[in-house]
């Protein structure tokens, strides 16, 4: 059976003041059975099983969005890189990837889609990245759009979807069902994933007479 | 499922379509259709008047913005066939693009109600400037599925009679499966067999949009189901023009994916006029 699709609820607290962030993170984890991924700014006071921080800190996973030199005493760090899809060999985004690689192993690569870039071009870039940088890639649902997300997931087992909100879980669930793949709730902690049930199936009305009765009397003559 | 490989610059034609609905009321009550809500406690003959040219003028639609205009029912008993012939004749005088009007479903109703021959009705449609009959009524050919979807519509042999008559008068007809979870292997095989046997002028793929219909509890069709349907139809009919009805924006990704799957064009609505 092919790789399961992962639903990783993600909470971004980088812009939120600490007292509110702590409360929000707690509620977020409570509402997802304790499984969820949190992105915070610097040295965080938040307690959670799966956390990344945007400023490199010892012992914490680094969420890298721009090129930055990491001091030697902090290396090696586990790194997640979140960048737009590079569109050529000279793209400055490749420097971000190089600097992240210098800080430690790239554990996760999250790609955003720049506007006005054709899907065919993105596919070429993603395939190149899969061959050269990392064996799996996360694509951002909001910027890629669900048509592109559906296509890319169906085309490759190595692609997962990032930033799927609770409201859009049904879309992921529908795709998983169509591709006959399991859907699991998981974060970056070593805890085992939780398998999510397939969406409810409503049986189609089998009895034509039942359909007939839904019409007014004078329309049943045919 | 094997996804088609995208090719740079291989997007298909995006065809802007103007849609006209003769009346929002319909007695047929097909499960997948938004017109499937008959007026409660009002006879169809008491239904409000249908579409007029004044509706188009009031909406201020730009006819030249579209590559084709499609006129569809509501099966209402209100306006006679000749009213629509005059309507189409006026429309044709103002519009040079492709005009697709009615489907065998509406033609059969006029045939039964007004006791006029199919050939007469279709000749008149052609005289009014119609280029092609729409695909309405060709959603399914499996008796079980038909009983669940469209139990009150015309029978398959009646549909084919109209289609054949249309071919004889030089009108042509199209067919359109509705894509969704209901299309199993049996339904597909049946559909492809009918296409091969009756050779329509073109094919359309309509993903089920269950929102606002009696089937709202079912999921609408996904893009992956649509791609699989296009691949299947393209394999069965390599040379038949194949269009996809798709209104979900943005269109670029869908167009690239459908082109790779083998579709020839993407029909997207730019305006729709329905009488209140």
Image (cartoon, coloured by chain):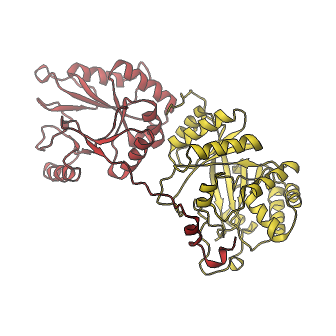
Chain colours: A red, B yellow
**Residue shown at the point (42%, 46%) measured from the top left:** A174
Q: Quadrant of the N terminus of chain A?
A: top left
Q: In which quarter of the image is residue A94?
A: top left
**Residue occupying the point 86% across, 54% down:** B126
Side of A150 where B5 appears, left or right: right
> Left or right of B55: which side holds A209?
left
Q: Where is residue A87 in the image (x, y as percent from the top left)?
A: 44, 25
- Report whether residue B252 is seen: yes
Q: In this view, does A68 lie above or below B243?
A: above
Above-or-below relation of B193 to A98: below
- Residue B200 appears in the picture as rendered: no
Q: Where is residue A43 in the image (x, y as percent from the top left)?
A: 12, 37
Residue A24's spot in the image, x, y percent? 19, 52
Judge from the rendering whether residue B210 lies leftward or rightward of residue A2; answer left or right.
right
The quadrant of the picture occupied by the C terminus of chain A is bottom right
- Of residues A66 and B102, the one nearer the viewer is B102
Instruction: Tell me which corner region of the image, top left, top right, bottom left or bottom right, holds residue B144.
Output: bottom right
Report x, y in % for residue A168. 38, 49
Please tell me which residue is depicted at 68% across the width and 40% down the height of the picture: B242
In the displayed structure, A221 sits above or below A124; it is below
């Amino acid at each position: 059976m092919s790789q399961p699709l992962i639903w990783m609820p993600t909470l971004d607290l980088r812009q939120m003041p600490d007292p509110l962030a702590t409360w929000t993170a707690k509620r977020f984890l409570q509402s997802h059975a304790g499984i969820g991924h949190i992105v915070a700014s610097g040295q965080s006071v938040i307690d959670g099983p799966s956390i990344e921080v945007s400023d490199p800190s010892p012992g914490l996973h680094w969420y890298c969005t721009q090129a930055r030199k990491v001091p030697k005493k902090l290396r090696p760090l586990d790194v997640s890189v979140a960048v737009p899809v590079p569109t050529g060999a000279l793209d400055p985004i490749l420097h971000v990837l190089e600097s992240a690689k210098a800080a430690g192993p790239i554990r996760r690569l999250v790609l955003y889609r720049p506007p006005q870039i054709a899907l065919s071009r993105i596919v070429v870039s993603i395939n190149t990245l899969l061959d050269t940088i990392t064996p799996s890639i996360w694509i951002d649902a909001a910027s890629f759009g669900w048509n592109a997300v559906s296509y890319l997931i169906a085309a490759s087992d190595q692609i997962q979807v990032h930033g799927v909100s609770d409201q859009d879980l049904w879309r992921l669930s529908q795709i998983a069902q169509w591709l006959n793949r399991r859907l699991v709730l998981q974060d970056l902690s070593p805890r085992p994933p939780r398998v999510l049930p397939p969406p409810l199936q409503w049986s189609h009305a089998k009895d034509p007479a039942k359909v007939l009765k839904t019409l007014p009397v004078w329309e049943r003559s045919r | 499922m094997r996804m088609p490989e995208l090719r740079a610059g291989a997007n298909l034609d995006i065809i802007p379509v103007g849609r006209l609905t003769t009346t929002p009321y319909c007695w047929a009550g097909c499960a997948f259709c938004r017109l499937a809500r008959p007026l409660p406690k009002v006879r169809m003959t008491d239904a409000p008047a249908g579409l007029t040219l004044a509706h188009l003028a009031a909406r201020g639609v730009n006819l030249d913005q579209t590559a084709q205009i499609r006129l569809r029912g509501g099966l209402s008993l209100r306006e006679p066939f000749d009213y629509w012939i005059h309507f189409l004749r006026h429309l044709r005088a103002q519009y040079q693009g492709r005009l697709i009007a009615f489907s065998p479903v509406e033609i059969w109703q006029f045939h039964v109600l007004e006791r006029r021959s199919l050939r007469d009705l279709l000749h008149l449609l052609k005289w009014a400037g119609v280029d092609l009959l729409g695909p309405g009524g060709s959603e399914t050919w499996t008796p079980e599925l038909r009983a669940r979807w469209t139990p009150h519509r015309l029978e398959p042999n009646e549909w084919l009679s109209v289609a054949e008559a249309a071919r004889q008068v030089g009108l042509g007809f199209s067919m359109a499966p509705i894509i969704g979870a209901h299309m199993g292997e049996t339904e597909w095989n049946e559909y492809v067999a009918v296409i091969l046997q009756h050779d329509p002028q073109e094919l359309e793929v309509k993903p089920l949009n269950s929102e606002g219909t009696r089937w709202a509890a079912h999921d609408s069709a996904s893009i992956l189901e649509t791609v699989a349907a296009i691949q299947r139809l393209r394999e069965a009919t390599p040379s038949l023009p194949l269009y996809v009805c798709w209104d979900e924006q943005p269109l670029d990704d869908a167009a690239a994916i459908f082109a790779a799957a083998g579709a020839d064009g993407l029909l997207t609505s730019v305006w729709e006029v329905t009488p209140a």
